Image (cartoon, rainbow, N blue to C red):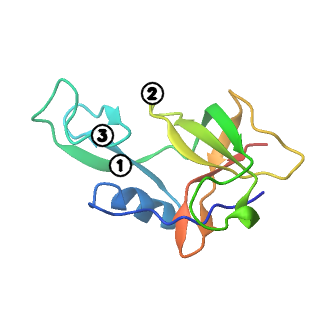
Amino acid sequence: MGIPIHPPRFDSDLLRPFYEGLAAGELRLTADSETGQWAWYPPEMMPGRPAATLVWRRASDEGTVYSFTRVERSLLPGDHRAEVPFTVVLFEPDDAPGCRVPGLFVAGDDVSAACGMRVRLSPVQAGDHVVAGFAPIG
């Protein structure tokens, strides 16, 4: 399995709590502070509730693979041949239905991702930052 070494860009602080959570071994997502409704990707305002306040909360580390794709060659500028192939999954946490978080599929070469597969958060060190990784359960 390759690991893409491409640090997140922080043009704003919108996603900083997500990456801080990963570095602490937690999956943190945004939710409406009043209703508790999860929202991912963090919107600048909640649909239908423009006055709502979003807060970062810890989400379940376990869930299912909603979708996946295998990256065979990098389209990033520069030489990234050593970082491929890798598989990216969309992870849906058990307690946050409808939220689909992208991350690396972390498993041996003999295990392939599959829709509906049960996985658990397994953050991955990628250069000088941590990215979301998800490993099969069991």
Which residue type does callout 1 highlight?
Answer: Arg
Which residue type does callout 3 highlight?
Answer: Ala
Instruction: Give SS at disc 1.
Output: strand
- Neighbour tally class for label 2: few under 14, some 14-19, many 20 plus, Cα within 10 Å: some
Q: Determine contact: label 3, label 1, CB under 8 Å.
A: yes
Residue 74 position, x and y percent, is 66, 54
Residue 18 position, x and y percent, is 40, 56
* Mark nearer the N terminus (3 vs 2): 3
- Residue with the mark numbered 1: 57
Which residue type does callout 2 highlight?
Answer: Gly
Instruction: Give SS at disc 2.
Output: loop
Residue 116 position, x and y percent, is 68, 27
* Mark nearer the N terminus (1 vs 2): 1
Q: Residue furthest left?
A: 51
**In whole angstroms, how far apart are the C-alphas of marks 3 and 1?**
7 Å
Instruction: Give SS at disc 3.
Output: strand
Q: Residue furthest bottom?
A: 128
- Neighbour tally class for label 3: few under 14, some 14-19, many 20 plus, Cα within 10 Å: many
- Residue with the mark numbered 2: 98
Residue 85, above or below 39:
below
Horizontally, residue 13 falls left or right of residue 21, namely: left
Q: Do we see residue 70 in this rendering?
A: yes
* Mark nearer the N terminus (3 vs 1): 3
> Picture quarter containing residue 41?
top left
Residue 78 position, x and y percent, is 61, 67
Foreground disc of the pair 3, 2: 2
- Residue with the mark numbered 3: 31
Horizontally, residue 137 falls left or right of residue 63, namely: right
**In whole angstroms, how far apart are the C-alphas of marks 1 and 2?**
16 Å
